[in-house]
Image (cartoon, coloured by chain):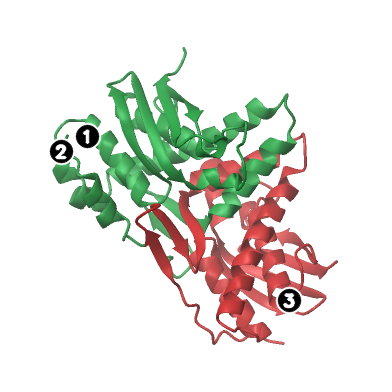
Amino acid sequence: MAVRTKTEIVLDQRFDPRTCRHSLNGQGIVLHCHHYISLYTQLADDCSLLDAKRLLTEVAEDSFSVALASYYENHNVTNIADRFAIATQYYAVCGLGSMKVLCAGPYSGTVELDRSHVDESWIAKWGKREQPVNFITQGFIAGMFAAAMGRPTRSFSVVETQSIVSGAERSVFNVVSN
Amino acid sequence: MAIDRKRIIAALSQVQVNADGFGLIPAFNVFVNQLPCEFWNSFAERLTRQVGPDMLEAAEWLLVDAARTCGYHTGYGIITSEEWKAVVQPMVEKVPEDILHGAFAVFTAWGWAKSEIVELVPAERMVVRAYDYYEADVVTLGHSAKPSAYMITGVCAAFMGLAYGGDYDPTGGAAMRAFDCVQTKGIECGDEYGEFVTTRAAV
């Protein structure tokens, strides 16, 4: 099934002068830079005491699935294709890059990135490397599939099979239902 | 002091960063992202609670260092930006002290922490208080024995490095690490505000 992109995301960005906090569609958000996201990613990658790569992926899945599920509920987005269209726009709004969902179903999917904030940030700081670094997008995609399909988190596993950080033109993620 | 915090916060809190056609946000000489606060909090808190007492200090150092690096480079981007030149620069009389005060007004406007400098000994010591900050959200009931504002801690050290550590060094280096900061109070620990004491780094 080809994914249609007919739905435009609605952005409700606010600043609360009392707390001095920003929110996007009701969820607290904060600006950070490519150094910060790269160093968190490196921390996860280097950590030998626990599986911090998995932790970072799960944290991303949890945070983004909440944001997307809440959006779908508040805006009554029920169509699967519209849900993916909203999710990829939200990914771009976050500054994470340009995402395309090539195919998606209840059991599997394939997602591509033409541009990637995490990969390009890593390359800018430390250069290319063979192993993938985009644990955050892995989590985003798992959360996106869970929210789109109305399933709980940890319902999908995501593996990055091709990476911009390794010199590929685009990153590719394969999704499989658990 | 000529810095009008209220005016800076009112003006710069309205600045919106928008992604380009590639889903990227180039701004202030860096690429920025706008992610849920919950994402950053969840990773930092779960990591520091899972590494064990022997490695806690090392994990915390890495989290603070990420913020120090972010604060140093993005901080420099901010104080050389068009937005800064338009809003804050006309208020700057005493350099670099007014720049530091202005930087914390911007820090507040952008939602990192509702914070201000309450004590400044030029080139030696700075005390910052934060009256509301997202890193305190890791506690919703009761008080934590562990302060959790790694981002504010790192940024305080970075801003002092920018002010008094010498010329900006795009590679980071000694200037970025000229100061260290310690969080001495935290809303997450039951205090009324977070407090951050920055002093010269031990040689």
Question: Disc 2 versus disc 3: distance between alpha carbons?
Answer: 54 Å
Q: Which numbered dot is residue B98?
A: 1
Element type at mark 1: helix
Question: Disc 1 versus disc 2: distance between alpha carbons?
Answer: 7 Å
The residue at which mark 3 appears reads as A150
Check whether the beta carbons of the residues at disc 1 and disc 3 lie within 8 A of each other: no
Quarter the C terminus of chain A occupies: bottom right
The subunit letter for the residue under badge 1 reads: B
Element type at mark 2: loop
Chain displayed in green: B
Question: Disc 1 versus disc 3: distance between alpha carbons?
Answer: 52 Å
Q: Nearer the viewer, residue B155 or A126?
A: B155
The residue at which mark 2 appears reads as B2
The residue lying furthest to the top in this view is: B203
| Residue A77 percent coordinates (x, y) | 60, 83
Element type at mark 3: loop
Chain displayed in red: A
Residue type at numbered disc 2: Ala
Bin the neighbour count of mark 3 within 10 Å (Cα to Cα): few under 14, some 14-19, many 20 and up.
some
Instruction: Identify the image quadrant of residue A67.
Output: bottom right
Classify B114 as above or below B126.
below
Q: Is residue B96 visible?
A: no
Horizontal relation, residue A2 to residue A48: left or right: left
Instruction: Identify the image quadrant of residue A138.
Output: bottom right
| Residue A71 percent coordinates (x, y) | 57, 74
The subunit letter for the residue under badge 3 reads: A
Check whether the beta carbons of the residues at disc 1 and disc 2 lie within 8 A of each other: yes
Check chain identity for marks 2 and 3: say if they share one.
no
Q: Earlier in the sequence, mark 1 or mark 2?
A: 2
Classify A111 as above or below B81.
below
Classify B138 as above or below B12.
above
Give the residue drawn at x 27%, y 36%.
Answer: B101
